[in-house]
Amino acid sequence: MANINAGVICLMFLSLLLFISNAENSLPFLKTKVIGPHLKVSKLHFYVQDIAGGDNPTVYEVARASITGNSSVRFGQVKVMDHLITAEADQASAVVGRVQGLITSADLGVMGFATNLNFYFTVGEYNGSTISIVGRNEIGQATRELPVVGGTGLFRFATGYSISSTYSYDAATSHSVIEYTFYVKTAGARLKNIEHEFM
């Protein structure tokens, strides 16, 4: 009888793990691998809709330096953004979150931005979770790499990196589509609630 109960419990536990794994991987932009009790690695792939013109831009200048107007790279310009994150490149595809933050033109020679962005997800069990990236973003490069410096919710203890590239640009509407791929390490189930270890 004890063996039967143990078998049933084990089967239920495995079913729960499979359900959780399938729930996470059912999100079109995210794949996850669990590596032991303390570590989870996720790959996220999505698109950011960067709209600088038209009636409803999603980025605005909030400050500039005395040199900005005469600078070919707009040195000293600071912009704040709130762009949509979509599952596909098409702006009409499923919205999975928003990217919010600041970019500052911080290179006197090329278009290089000091970047501080928070990727805020709004779907499934990741609703409300965030990933933060900070670093140098030279937009003239075909691909750009920035470090993941933290996260919240299901991305607590996040580290890793992001790779981005310009998927498309429409000069008439000043609409850029930026393709992002993230590789993120986060805490396993035990470490996610580490505050309880100190109670």
Image (tube, rainbow, N blue to C red):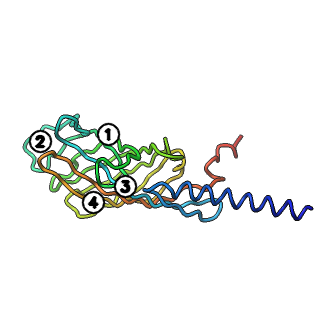
Amino acid tagged 2? Ile
Q: Residues within 10 Å of mark 4 (few under 14, many from 20)?
A: some
Asked which quadrant contains residue 24, the reply is bottom right
Q: Are marks 1 and 4 in contact (CB under 8 Å)?
A: no
Q: Are marks 1 and 3 in contact (CB under 8 Å)?
A: no
Q: Earlier in the sequence, mark 4 or mark 2?
A: 2
Q: Are marks 3 and 4 in contact (CB under 8 Å)?
A: no
> Considering the image in quadrants, where does the N terminus appear?
bottom right
Asked which quadrant contains residue 53, the reply is top left
Tell me if 136 is positioned left or right of 158 in this view. left
> Considering the image in quadrants, where does the C terminus appear?
top right
Q: Residues within 10 Å of mark 2 (few under 14, many from 20)?
A: few
Residues 195 and 29: in front is 29
Q: Earlier in the sequence, mark 3 or mark 4?
A: 3
- Which of discs 4 and 2 lies nearer the camera? The answer is 4
Q: Earlier in the sequence, mark 2 or mark 3?
A: 3
Spatial CA span between label 1 and label 3: 16 Å
Residue 165 is labelled as 4
Q: Are marks 4 and 2 in contact (CB under 8 Å)?
A: no
Q: Residues within 10 Å of mark 1 (few under 14, many from 20)?
A: many
Query: Quick check: 44 above or below 75?
Result: below
Q: Position of residue 115 (x, y in %)?
A: 31, 48
Residue on which the image places disc 2 = 67
Spatial CA span between label 2 and label 3: 35 Å
Residues 133 and 51: in front is 51
Q: Earlier in the sequence, mark 2 or mark 1?
A: 2
Indicate the secondary structure of the residue bearing disc 3.
strand
Amino acid tagged 4? Ser
